[in-house]
Image (cartoon, grey):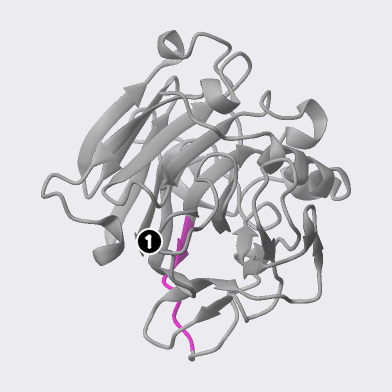
Amino acid sequence: MRKKRSLLAGLAATAALATVPWLTAPADAGAAQDRTDGKAAAVAEFGDEFDGAAGDPVDSSKWRLDPGDNESNHELQYYTDGTSNAQLDGEGHLVVTAKREANGEQCWYGPCEYTSARMNTAQTFTTTYGHAEISAKITRGQGMWPAFWMLGTDIGDVGWPACGEIDVMENVGNEPDTVHGTVHGPGYSGGEGVGASYRLPDGGDFADDFHTYAVDWSPNKITWSVDGAEYQTLTPEDVGGEWVFDHDFYLILNVAVGGDWPGSPDEGTEFPQEMVVDHVRVTGGE
């Protein structure tokens, strides 16, 4: 499908990666036995159950907050780096909160009018392939844009979209019963990204309950699912350009407000809006 996603995510990450050359170091890995040849293979594993006291920040050994605004994507929020917009609730959840508030920062359009949070594992965990999933109850309302996605660690060298982007889950608030899974690469990026959507079969809203959004990523194949129901598989023949998904990627989790794709909040959008995350897990990667 055609999606209105801009270059900003890649451009912002490029700047960050360029200043930290060791971000492309191998992922944390444990040894696992390869059943086919008997050799020990490195398996990348990541898990965060968000256990901790209410008000605690995210675990900095797993996530790093990524502050700033997003001019290229015309998002309206300022991503903060404290616990005001991302904290544990003491019940095994991470709560990412988008607020309508001025925080004294300047955004691309003037004084910032909203705050939220964005975090990534670029410095703490990367993987090639594997099953990556998030269980979350997402935000609702016009202008809201929650997402769980991945970027190639070579973005600092080759830029976006040559590094590749895998969007595990995105939702725009004016589609409360629909989520999207997409890839971006050379020749199929931004509004030309290749993907599909999944609609709740019972006609409910994704914001009403927890759902599990996942990709199963292997050489030359990526499959998307919601609550175990597969809804899309892509291979190199499907993208109409170079397949750039056979190297290390890192995880990103954020809630945007506004932007080119969802549009701005309207009078019906209530704030604060919360994305409540039960867990994030990666298994079986390299």
First to last magenta residue range? 46-52
Give the residue at x 34% y 60%: 135
From the image, tell me which residue sits under label 1.
Answer: 140
Side (left or right) of 147 relative to 76? left
- Say whether residue 48 is magenta: yes
Residue 245 seen in render: no
Label 1 crowd bin: few (<14), some (14–19), many (20+), radius 10 Å: many
Q: Secondary structure at mark 1?
A: loop
The residue positioned 68% from the left and 67% from the top of the image is 113
Where's residue 212, x and y in %? 29, 54
Give the residue type that dot 1 points to: Arg
Screen quadrant of the N terminus: top left
* Residue 125 locus on image (x, y percent): 61, 53
Q: Would residue 99 be found to the left or right of residue 225 on screen?
A: right
Residue lying at 25% horizontally and 65% vertically, measured from the top left: 208
The foreground one among 123 and 177 is: 177
39, above or below 57, in the image: above
